Image (cartoon, rainbow, N blue to C red):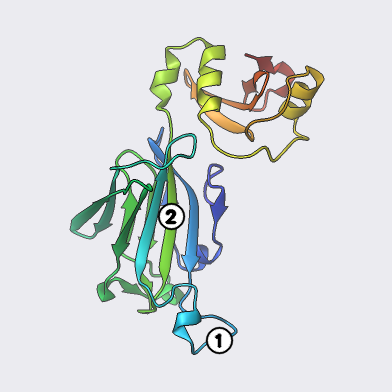
Amino acid sequence: MQSPFIRFWDSRLDKLNIKVAAAENPTYRLVEAYFQDNRDPENPNDREAAESKNGIKIMVGVVDARGRALTNVRVIQAFPGEEAFALTTPAGYCEFDMSGDSSFDPNKNQAGPYTIFIRGGDKVVGLGLPLRQHVQYLLKFQQTPPARQLDGLELGVAAKVALANTFGVPLNTQAALAKFAVQNKLGIPLTDESEFQWQGATYVGQMWSGGAVFCKQGDFGNIQVA
């Protein structure tokens, strides 16, 4: 996994030399990346039984900070010397075809020529057709509130804004923040822990039904509630 914000990263992407170029204070973060192979291990000669169904697309989903589909977001497919773009549908989805020219040999440490990104956001680099095999990629980007909007807020308010705009499920109820929230009777957890930036410092926090619990990264002896 290439970033703490990525909720799912298909390990097969590592073998294809595909990487994430993380943006500083991104407007969109990559949160999920899947790979669809061109063969089914149980039916190696049946291309229609394969994950990719013999397709050659890069499929992209875009959601807001609360996980809702975003329409008319311009997603860019960059190829050496040129760019193409597609706008997301009302379902928050768009797709790109890959050409035979995108073939590469991962066994020779090569990577594909395509890069997928949204302006100001993380980039997925090295996509293509490995040895011309018909494979597909599924990527999901999530909108993030710009850090500069938080800097002008009081810390407690900034924490609520940042943490309320995270999307996920409560996964780690045994962590220090969660234990603090339980001890202080803050109800039930609404999100997992996540990071946010405020005035040049990194904080970690979690939203509970009774408020936000947070502290500077690593400073769990000084947890605050807002």
In the picture as drawn, the residue positioned furthest to the left comes out as 81
Residue 108 location, x and y as percent?
42, 75
Asked if residue 23 lies left or right of residue 3, the reply is left
Residue 163 location, x and y as percent?
55, 26
**Residue at the (31%, 48%) spot, across then down:** 88
Q: Mark 1 highlights which residue?
A: 43
**Residue at the (45%, 81%) spot, across then down:** 48
**Residue at the (63%, 33%) spot, across then down:** 193
**Residue at the (56%, 43%) spot, across then down:** 4
The amino acid type, in three-letter code, at marker 2 is Leu
Residue 135 location, x and y as percent?
41, 72
Q: Secondary structure at mark 1?
A: loop
In the picture as drawn, the residue positioned furthest to the bottom comes out as 45
Asked if residue 196 lies left or right of residue 77, the reply is right
Q: Secondary structure at mark 2?
A: strand
Q: Decide which of 203, 200 is in the foreground and name it.
A: 203
Q: Which mark is residue 139?
A: 2
